[in-house]
Image (cartoon, helix red, strand yellow):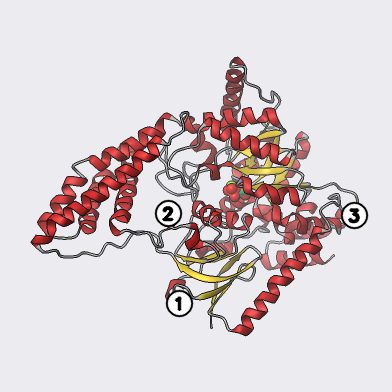
Amino acid sequence: MLSLFGSGIGRDIAIGQAYVLRTGTIDTPKTALKRSELDAEVSRFKRAVAATLKKYRTILRELPKDAPKESAAFINAHMMMLRDPLLVDESIKIIRHEQINAEHALRIQSGNLIKVFEQMDDPYLRNKKTDVEHITNRLLRNLLGIVAHSLEDTSEDDLRGRIIVSNDISPAETLFIKERNVAAFITDLGSTISHTAVVARSLRLPAVVGLHGSARYINENDLLIVDGKRGIVLINPSELVLKQYRALQRRHREREVELNTLVKRASKTIDGQKVNLLANVETINELKEVRRVNAAGIGLYRTEYLFMNREVAPSEAEQFSAYKRIVAGVDKPVAIRTLDIGGDKQLDFPYPQKASSESPLGMRAVRLCLNNMDLFKPQLRAILRASAFGRVSIMIPMVSNYDEINQVLSLIKQTKRELKAEGIEFDKRIKVGGMIEVPAAAIMADLFAQQLDFLSIGTNDLIQFTLAIDRVDDAVNYLYDPIHPAVLHLIRRVIKAGDKANIPVSLCGEMAGNVQYTRLLLGLGLRNFSMDATYILAVKERILNVDTEKLHYRVKQILKAGNPSVARDQLRQLNQL
Ligand code: PEP
Ligand code: MG
């Protein structure tokens, strides 16, 4: 038995067989052909082009009537590229001249085209290289008959109960694999606060990330134990170890039963402080858990997951129906966050201001929306329409300056006017809040609290930006420290700004669901926690057993501690009170 150690995600343990995924570039071995084989090779290539075109025609035919104009335009552009002599005829010429297989010829020609696009001055044209890559990969998969082990082409039966072993997994893929009932995943890259990790936790998909070179030790179908809590992967464990892990799984289930007794208890501290425990959700499938744990509402609905794993953006009608289902599904307040894409959350379809890099500091969240009205406007309309059916609020991610907030507010006003003129119902007094994720926003919280109806502290990003640590880079993950005094001072500042302006402040980063920080956050004055629903009862247990009056001294010590080990020691003492 071999053990690998990485960073664990979630609290669960999974046992299953390995499914080793080949991601990244598709291998295209070069094969020399005889002159007599060339005609057949060219025909094979043409058949792959025809099959890919057919697939696009189906997508086009199945587009909803009210899909945005760009959706059809995007598919048509891909189809045009597939008919373009520069891609097709030139690849055929290479097959014939070089006497090589179609895959390799296509790879050469697509490389030539990518180089041309990379040299373009216009950023929109430069971005076209991703279209070439997309089409090339589709064609290659068709040519190679691949299928196996590229996520896009696997069936639910292939994946059910398996443990995916991959170099990396994107947030969109995490959603995809969960829908196919994968038991767990392990990756060479990745960190515990990336969006992939956030989604995995909320979907209760145990994972170990940052394993570096795991595929060297793991073969297809090996039996694996993935221990998300401890960050351990065991390869082909002995019967004895399997027995121990199955016992651990049983103990987890017993603990859950114990926590279930708290569902009906009011969330109040010993000294009578009421604490709102809200849920973060990514998909409608999570509502069952939200209702089961009796969450006070949804403090963060990450709408971007509705836009992932698809060829076109969801229309206003589709969004409206999804938001309405969420609102009706909980019958409690729901904060719908507008699209937070960019950075490590990418969409498959193009839109005009698509970020050219995956930097979290780039074209992301509200900035991306304000630069892409075709994405933003239908979403605002859909949220406003859903607000007629329950207590909905709009939450704006990653606000960083006064003008940006004003732009969003006037856009919402304008959208309301349009809906009114069309005779469409919406909540006229809908609340609009902002996520405090950028240090500048935390520092300006006093001012922002006057513009907005509520604030929500997104500590995942706030910590990333305050400490200058890329949240997806496992090499600097060890510096990600929620109790760094700089972070805590900013959190306290935002809570105070909210109190002063008499508006609610919640915290919706991963920190809210970690029981280690419950007392600390209560001591900083936080009374609205929003977290993955599966953590709510454990946090409630902490709340029921704490007297906030007794927290002040230790919290002050933590805020004062310059040295991280002193801060950790004070936190330990705070949690032992
Ligand atoms: C955050 O940054 O803390 C947050 C809740 O948003 P996300 O994790 O989706 O970036
Ligand atoms: Mg964020």
Q: Circle 2 sits on which residue?
A: 152
Q: Circle 3 sits on which residue?
A: 270
Q: Circle 1 sits on which residue?
A: 217
Name which of mark 2 and mark 3 comes first in the sequence: 2
Q: Is residue 530 visible?
A: no
Spatial separation of the CA atoms under disc 1 and disc 3: 51 Å
What crowding class fits label 2: few (fewer than 14 Cα within 10 Å), some (14-19), or many (20 or more)?
few
Badge 3 marks a residue whose secondary structure is loop
**Which residue is at a point 35% across and 38% down the rendered structure image?**
75
Q: Are marks 2 and 3 in contact (CB under 8 Å)?
A: no
Q: Is mark 3 within 8 Å of ligand 1?
A: no
At label 1, the amino acid type is Tyr
Horizontal relation, residue 30 to residue 487: left or right: left
At label 2, the amino acid type is Glu
Could you tell me how many numbered marks the image carries?
A: 3
Residue 55 higher or lower than 111, as above or below: above
What crowding class fits label 3: few (fewer than 14 Cα within 10 Å), some (14-19), or many (20 or more)?
some
Q: Nearer the viewer, residue 55 or 126?
A: 55
Q: Nearer the viewer, mark 1 or mark 3?
A: 1
